[in-house]
């Protein structure tokens, strides 16, 4: 899990990129509290072969579930 | 084409149109918008420096911040947050401004200059790209200014209120302000036109996340061309507009408010690109984020205002090439500006190194 809450762009996507490069997970949950980060991570996931499921878990807090595409 | 992609192309198109319109309405050539120049003019208008030719409270800047505030509020995206290394952001804002004013333009004006045929800006673009590359390397090595935190809502209104106060002063008590009688500061559109341009572009930039530095950064980071397409849309719109209106003059010398000191254009904009990546966005983006309630970006904008004042008080800003009585007078960056840029680059290196973190502590 990557907890990128409190970080502004581009840090959340950098943190996710590092985690994907390090462990190439089949699934990765990411927590963010910035809509710009939601958009950036979604685009990164699209370029990297992951599907994204976005849930607003609290007021302005989002959970992104990245799932590796077959 | 996704909704987000259509939005950023629209934002780029409208920003380009607004830049063309503001130039036609009285702003200096190739300067429909320039965040660095306009913040410098505001610093002069407030008496923070005494360069007589660059003093005016630019309503475009006020509009950009208030447009972002209105857009963020309407979209439930206004959120007051702060606490991510504000003092360092203030210094970074100063460095970015010293570099931009040596080049004579922010990244947005760099695009407008290129679209006007100003080939002296090519070295600035190369330097900007180089600086972003160095910044991205820092990010990949673990650079971070740390987390920001939710703060009381009132914190988010600091820069919007400051801008609203500037507008009140401009309209109600202009006698307390300084106004250029000649030079770039005296060239401006009617205030309401400038304010409207700023409001529209500010709203669109907030919705689309338009960012000059972010566009190139994302290409380096993960080969994503989304943000840079806004950049490209501004360039294409202004280029076509200039070709149609006779404003495209491709030469290497005597461009409007520009100089041909290629090395220092390159190094100045390298400082801008590097600093913008460390800050998380270009000067335009800092204004927009401050309008969304980001206190750290508000501090950055105050740093940029201070940097603008220092640039002119210490003679660090670039001097434009000029034709005087048929004679070419070369402009450029003087020794103080060269020293300022070098100090800025050294500070960027130090800030980058001391803020490298091997591992994010809060990862699960």
Image (cartoon, rainbow, N blue to C red):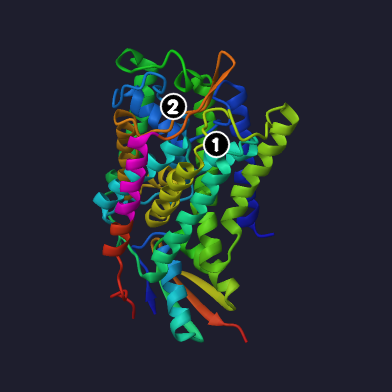
| Residue B58 image label | 2
Find residue B271 and report its horizontal and vertical position in percent.
Answer: 41, 49
Region in magenta? B334-348
| Residue B200 image label | 1
Question: Left or right of B166: which side holds B110?
Answer: right
Find residue A24 and report its horizontal and vertical position in percent.
Answer: 49, 85
- Where the C terminus of chain B falls, by quadrant? bottom left
- Membership of B338 in magenta stretch: yes
- Membership of B261 in magenta stretch: no
Q: Residue at x 30, y 64 (%)?
A: B353
Magenta region's main secondary structure?
A: helix
Question: Left or right of B20: which side holds B174?
Answer: left
Location of residue B301 with respect to B276 vertically, above or below: above
| Residue B140 image label | none
| Picture quadrant where residue B59 is located | top left
Q: Residue at x 26, y 55 (%)?
A: B85
Depth order, front residue of B252/B275: B252
Find residue A63 and report its horizontal and vertical position in percent.
Answer: 44, 72
């Amino acid at each position: 899990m990557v907890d990128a809450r409190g970080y502004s762009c581009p840090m959340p996507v950098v943190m996710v990129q590092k985690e994907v490069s390090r462990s190439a997970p089949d699934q990765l949950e990411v927590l963010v509290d910035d809509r710009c980060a939601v958009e950036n991570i979604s685009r990164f996931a699209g370029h990297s072969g992951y599907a994204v499921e976005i849930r607003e878990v609290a007021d302005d807090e989002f959970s992104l579930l990245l799932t590796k595409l077959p | 084409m996704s909704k987000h992609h259509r939005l950023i192309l629209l934002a780029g198109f409208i920003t380009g149109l607004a830049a063309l319109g503001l130039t036609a309405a009285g702003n200096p050539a190739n300067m429909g918008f320039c965040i660095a120049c306009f913040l410098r003019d505001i610093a002069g208008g407030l008496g923070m420096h005494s360069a007589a030719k660059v003093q005016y409270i630019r309503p475009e800047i006020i509009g950009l911040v208030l447009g972002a505030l209105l857009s963020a509020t309407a979209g439930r995206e206004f959120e007051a947050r702060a606490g991510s290394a504000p003092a360092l952001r203030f210094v970074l804002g100063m460095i970015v401004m010293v570099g931009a004013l040596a080049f004579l333009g922010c990244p947005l004006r760099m695009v407008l200059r290129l679209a006007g045929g100003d080939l002296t800006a090519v070295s600035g673009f190369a330097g900007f790209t180089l600086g972003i590359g160095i910044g991205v390397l820092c990010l990949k090595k673990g650079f971070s200014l740390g987390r920001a935190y939710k703060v009381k809502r009132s914190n988010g209104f600091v820069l919007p209120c400051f801008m609203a106060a500037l507008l009140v002063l401009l309209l109600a008590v202009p006698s307390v302000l300084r106004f250029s009688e000649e030079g770039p500061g005296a060239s401006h559109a009617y205030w309401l036109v400038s304010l409207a341009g700023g409001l529209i572009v500010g709203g669109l930039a907030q919705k689309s996340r338009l960012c000059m530095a972010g566009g190139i950064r994302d290409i380096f980071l993960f080969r994503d061309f989304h943000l840079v397409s806004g950049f490209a849309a501004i360039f294409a719109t202004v280029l076509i507009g200039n070709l149609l209106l006779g404003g495209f003059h491709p030469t290497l010398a005597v461009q409007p408010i520009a100089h041909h000191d290629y090395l220092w254009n390159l190094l100045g904009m390298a400082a801008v690109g590097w600093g913008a990546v460390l800050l998380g966005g270009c000067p335009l983006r800092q204004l927009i984020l401050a309008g969304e309630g980001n206190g750290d970006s508000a501090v950055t904008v105050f740093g940029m205002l201070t940097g603008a004042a220092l640039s002119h008080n210490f003679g660090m800003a670039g001097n434009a090439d000029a034709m005087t009585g048929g004679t070419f007078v070369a402009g450029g960056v003087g020794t103080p500006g060269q020293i300022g840029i070098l100090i800025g680059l050294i500070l960027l290196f130090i800030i980058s190194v001391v803020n490298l973190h091997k591992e994010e502590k809060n990862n699960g």
